[in-house]
Image: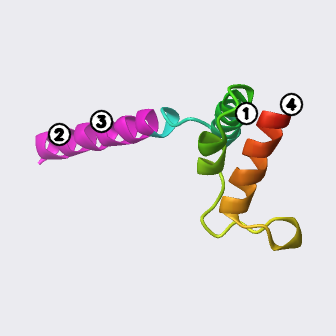
Amino acid sequence: MRARFGAGAGWACVLVLWSLLLGCSRTPPEQQLRESLGQLQAALERRDASAMSDWLADDFVGLDGMDRDAARRLARVMFLRH
């Protein structure tokens, strides 16, 4: 009986440690946000309006009812202008 309990407790410890290691391997949300903003900034610096619009939600609504496609077109105009 004691050996069976010891083996079960050992597996339980292994599972707990495994779950802790998996939990620690995730990228923190703030770091994910910073990486995403960095990628968006890189797309803007490359003057890539299509890559910029990929970061906008499908149901994006900007000022005066601007949709995602209009935001992409505005970015292209601004990139050509400057």
Q: Amino acid at mark 1?
A: Leu
What element does badge 2 sit on?
helix
CA distance separating discs 4 and 3 = 59 Å
Q: Which residue is mark 3?
A: 14
Q: Residue at x 78, y 51 (%)?
A: 74
How far separated are the C-alphas under marks 4 and 1? 12 Å
Q: Please, what is the three-letter code of the amino acid marked with disc 2?
A: Ala
Label 1, residues with CA under 10 Å away: few <14, some 14-19, many ≥20: some
**Dot placed on the residue nearer the N-terminal end, 4 or 1:** 1
**Residue designated by label 4:** 82
| Residue on which the image places disc 2 | 7
Q: Quadrant of the C terminus?
A: top right
- 41 in the magenta segment: no
Q: Which residues are magenta?
A: 1-22
Q: Residue at x 81, y 65 (%)?
A: 62
Left or right: 10 as drawn, with respect to 18: left
Look at 21% across and 39% down and name the residue there: 6
Number of the front mark, 4 or 2: 4
Q: Give residue 77's position: percent from left, percent from top.
A: 78, 44
Count neighbours of disc 4 (C-alpha within 10 A) and say few if under 14, some if 14 to 19, many if 20 or more. few
Q: CA distance from mark 1 to mark 3?
A: 47 Å
Which mark's residue is nearer the viewer, 4 or 3? 4
- Asked if disc 4 and disc 1 are in contact, CB closer than 8 Å, the reply is no
Residue 76 quadrant:
top right
- Asked which quadrant contains residue 21, the reply is top left
Name the side, left or right, on which 71 lies relative to 26.
right
To which residue does mark 1 refer?
44
The residues bearing labels 1 and 2 have C-alpha atoms spaced at a distance of: 57 Å
Prevailing SS of the magenta stretch: helix
Q: Nearer the viewer, mark 4 or mark 1?
A: 4
Q: Residue at x 56, y 35 (%)?
A: 27
Per the image, label 3 sits on a secondary structure element best described as helix
